[in-house]
Amino acid sequence: MNRLFLIVLCIFCLENIIAQDLIYKKDDKIVAGKILSIDSNAVKFQEISSPKEQIISISLDDIKEIKFDYNNNKFQPKNFTDYRRAKNAVSFGLGGTGGILSVNYDRVLFETPNFFLSSKIGLGSWLSQTNVNAHLTGNFNFGGTKHYLELGLGGAVGLGQYNKYYRYYASLPIIGYRLQPKSEKFFFRVYGCTFVLIQDAANNNISVPTLAIDLGFSF
């Protein structure tokens, strides 16, 4: 009877050990446990060697990969990878608030599985005038995990001599498409906006509909 009890206990323990999720961290450490929840910031789980009441949290920024146990139907790999968008992008721009040509840096500020908020800052040129430009956009996921509808606003300030040109520039509103795959480094954005040139030497303002393209890589 005792032998049968020990066999059942061993099988039960073995099943619990095997039926674990593996968390691969960026520092090459592997943590085995049971995933309890995943949000936009962290993964919460119970480690094998920890008491059941102790819940451990690991930041998503520290995680490279998660391998889910096949019995853990509640959390499939996509629940993790949906959050793993590249948070940074560097691109060259043509048109828009940046002017004829611009160099831009884009950063994800907040994210959920189907939405993220991003900001962009860049250095552009409109004819012989240089400007510092910025965007704030909301990005809505559609058609998978790499296609986004972008809505936002932007603006720029001219540097140096602006008496022959306009001092301020605005892009209101920004409506566009953003392609940012997670597994690839390619970054592409095309958007339309009302390009507003504000305050020339005679205090005139001009509004011009325009298209713009940003092309670069994400990381």
Image: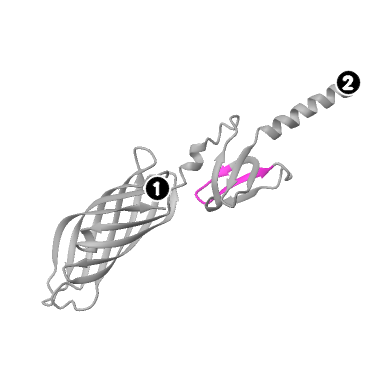
Q: Rounded to the nearest whole Å, what is the CA distance between mark 2 and mark 1?
A: 58 Å
Q: Is residue 83 magenta?
A: no
Q: Position of residue 81 (x, y in %)?
A: 48, 42
81 or 183, which is in the foreground? 183
Q: Compared with residue 157, is residue 80 higher up or lower down, i.e. above or below?
A: above
Asked if residue 151 lies left or right of residue 202, the reply is right
Q: Compared with residue 48, is residue 159 higher up or lower down, i.e. above or below?
A: below
Q: Give, as a three-letter code, the residue at label 1.
A: Phe
Residue located beneath label 1 in the image? 115
Identified at 24% across, 56% down, the residue is: 173
Asked if residue 172 lies left or right of residue 201, the reply is right
Q: Compared with residue 159, is residue 15 higher up or lower down, i.e. above or below?
A: above
Asked if residue 215 lies left or right of residue 108, the reply is left
Identified at 39% across, 41% down, the residue is: 145
Q: Position of residue 200 (x, y in %)?
A: 14, 74
Q: Quadrant of the N terminus?
A: top right
**Image quadrant where residue 49 sits:** top right
20 or 194, which is in the foreground? 20
Q: Position of residue 78 (x, y in %)?
A: 48, 38
Q: Helix, strand or loop at disc 2? A: loop
Residue located beneath label 2 in the image? 1
In magenta, the rendered stretch is 37-47
Q: Helix, strand or loop at disc 1? A: strand
Q: Position of residue 133 (x, y in %)?
A: 28, 66
Identified at 50% across, 39% down, the residue is: 79
Q: Residues within 10 Å of mark 2 (few under 14, many from 20)?
A: few
Furthest residue in direction right, as rendered: 2
Look at the magenta stretch and give its main secondary structure: strand
Identified at 81% across, 24% down, the residue is: 7
Q: Give, as a three-letter code, the residue at label 2.
A: Met
Pointer 2 or 1: first along the chain: 2
